[in-house]
Image (cartoon, rainbow, N blue to C red):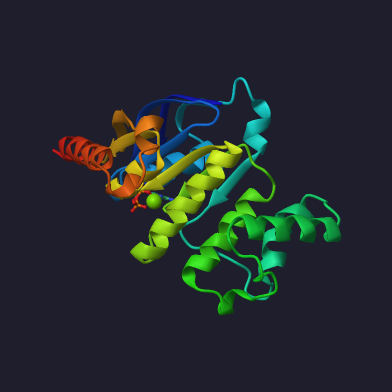
Amino acid sequence: MATLSGVAKRYGTGTLAVEGVDLALARGDFLALLGPSGCGKSTLLRMIAGLIDPSEGSIAFPADAAARKSIGFVFQEPTLMPWATAVRNVALPLELAGTPRREAALRATDMLARVGLAGFENAYPRALSGGMKMRVSIARALVTKPRLLLLDEPFAALDEITRFKLNQDLLQLWQAERFTVVFVTHSVFESVFLAERIVVMAPRPGRIVTELAVPAEDRATPEFRTSAPYAAHCREVSHALESAMA
Ligand SMILES: Nc1ncnc2c1ncn2[C@@H]1O[C@H](COP(=O)(O)OP(=O)(O)OP(=O)(O)O)[C@@H](O)[C@H]1O
Ligand SMILES: [Mg+2]
């Protein structure tokens, strides 16, 4: 889907945020970028999205050039328009792309139902909880049916119970639709719960130190979050992160 080769980013301030990143993203991957604050996770994600350019190296979408134009981005803050209802917030990307307003509203309503917000179409953001606002934000990112979904610590501001629920629902959406996901987090537990590929990064300069796998058959364990394989993967990822920081 996308191939990053020798990617580096030096900001105008002189900060070398990311260096020497090689990464191949396959269609249908669920990949987590895990690392401490300042290791360049957001920088890498913004480069994949094409929001900023690498200062060295390249990011190519070889087999799927259309994927570059088919990206959904979810930020840490839900960034909804306060003057618009939930359904209009979700419909906006479609309207901007020229979809007639009626059809956009129908698709937005459907997407809201898929993220568990049926019945909240006409609520304004101020009437929604933090978790519900994040659901609206995810619906807005998915309504255009992107092939690549990029999320930058989307659940960091939420309480643990809400976060677990959103983790589960995101996983279900991905299992149903199989878009490609790159999910930025600094939570070991979240990365193991969600991702099949966990890319561990270290700071100064930001770089990839190792990659770990969570096989699908482990995730299929009932009650995965409290299972022995889950605990074992969390331990493995924590150790990798510790050695990366050392
Ligand atoms: N626009 C910018 N201009 C200059 N320096 C920047 C800019 N954005 C990020 N940096 C610097 O680049 C480095 C990596 O930042 P980045 O935001 O990518 O890290 P991060 O891993 O996403 O951190 P966090 O987990 O805190 O969000 C940091 O040293 C940061 O100060
Ligand atoms: Mg960041």
Q: Where is residue 156 in the image (x, y as percent from the top left)?
A: 38, 59
On screen, residue 235 above or below 60: below
In which quadrant of the rendered image does the N terminus lie?
Answer: top right
Q: Position of residue 116 (x, y in %)?
A: 58, 61
**Can residue 99 be seen at all in this image of the molecule?**
yes
Q: Residue furthest left?
A: 246
* Quarter assignment of residue 233: top left
In-image side of 22 versus 94 (left or right): left
* Quarter assignment of residue 237: top left
Q: Which residue is drawn at 67% across and 76% down?
A: 83
* Quarter assignment of residue 191: top left
Residue nearest the viewer, comparing 113 with 156: 113
In-image side of 193 versus 170 (left or right): left
On screen, residue 77 above or below 19: below
Q: Residue at x 75, y 53 (%)?
A: 94
On screen, residue 153 above or below 220: below
Q: Residue at x 55, y 61 (%)?
A: 135
Q: Residue furthest top?
A: 63
In-image side of 29 versus 111 (left or right): left
Q: Residue furthest front?
A: 222
Residue nearest the viewer, comparing 175 with 103: 175
Q: Where is residue 218 in the image (x, y as percent from the top left)?
A: 34, 34
Total number of numbered labels?
Answer: 0
Q: Residue at x 68, y 30 (%)?
A: 66
Q: Residue furthest bottom?
A: 127
Q: Position of residue 92 (x, y in %)?
A: 72, 59
**Can residue 12 be seen at all in this image of the molecule?**
no
In which quadrant of the rendered image does the C terminus lie?
Answer: top left
